[in-house]
Image: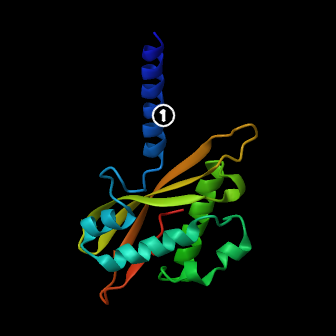
Amino acid sequence: MRAGRRGVARCAAAAFAALALAGCAAPGAGGRATDGDAIEVATEDGRLSRLARDFYARLENRRFNSISTFQDPGLHELFRSPEAYQDYYADLAYDLDVAHFEASRPTSVVVEGARRESERRVVLEVRFVGENGLPLRWWKVELVREDVWERDDAGRWWIQPGKV
């Protein structure tokens, strides 16, 4: 009878270890495309992949209800005009507020997919994750947006804001 209990204990320990290791798997493991992979597959353009990865990385852990984030010149450079940037920023800040992101701050920004609409137009599906700003809510909040990127005649990619 003791041997049976030891066997069950070993099986339980092995199952627990397997679950713990599965939780430590690297992002993108399990056949899921990483940020850059999804973009490159849809566009066959490594430059857009790098631009998007860098842009969305700059959005992580930034407060969008803060003037310092709004004035960050690194965020402006992928918009054709100051007005386009202002429209995009206002729309994103509003969406984060409505989704109850604590301090309007996404802690993780991931490109989940890319859809090519034309030779010069790609739509990226972007997931923002952050802490819940509502009282007594310990779970995370998420926001999924579609951002439109367009390439001009010179081959430069720009973010096109949605209509506010």
Asked whether 8 or 54 is in front, the reply is 8
User: In the image, is residue 105 above or below residue 158?
Assistant: above
Judge from the rendering whether residue 143 lies leftward or rightward of residue 11; answer left or right. right
Q: Quadrant of residue 111?
A: bottom left
Give the residue drawn at x 37%, y 61%: 34
Q: Is residue 54 visible?
A: yes
Q: Is residue 129 left or right of residue 158?
A: right
The one of 77 and 86 positioned closer to us in this rendering: 77
Q: Residue at x 63, y 40 (%)?
A: 139
Residue 138 on image: x %, y %: 68, 40
How many badges with numbers are in the image? 1
- Position of the C terminus, as image quadrant, is bottom right
Residue 36 is drawn in which quadrant? bottom left
Amino acid marked by disc 1: Phe
Give coordinates of residue 118: x percent, y percent. 24, 69
Q: Residues within 10 Å of mark 1 (few under 14, many from 20)?
A: few
Where disc 1 sits, the SS reads helix
Seen in the picture, residue 142 relative to 64 is either above or below; the reply is: above
Residue 19 versus residue 103 in the image, above or below: above
- The image position of residue 3, as x and y in percent, is 44, 16
**Which residue does the numbered mark 1 point to in the structure image?**
16
| Residue at 55 percent of width and 58 percent of height | 108
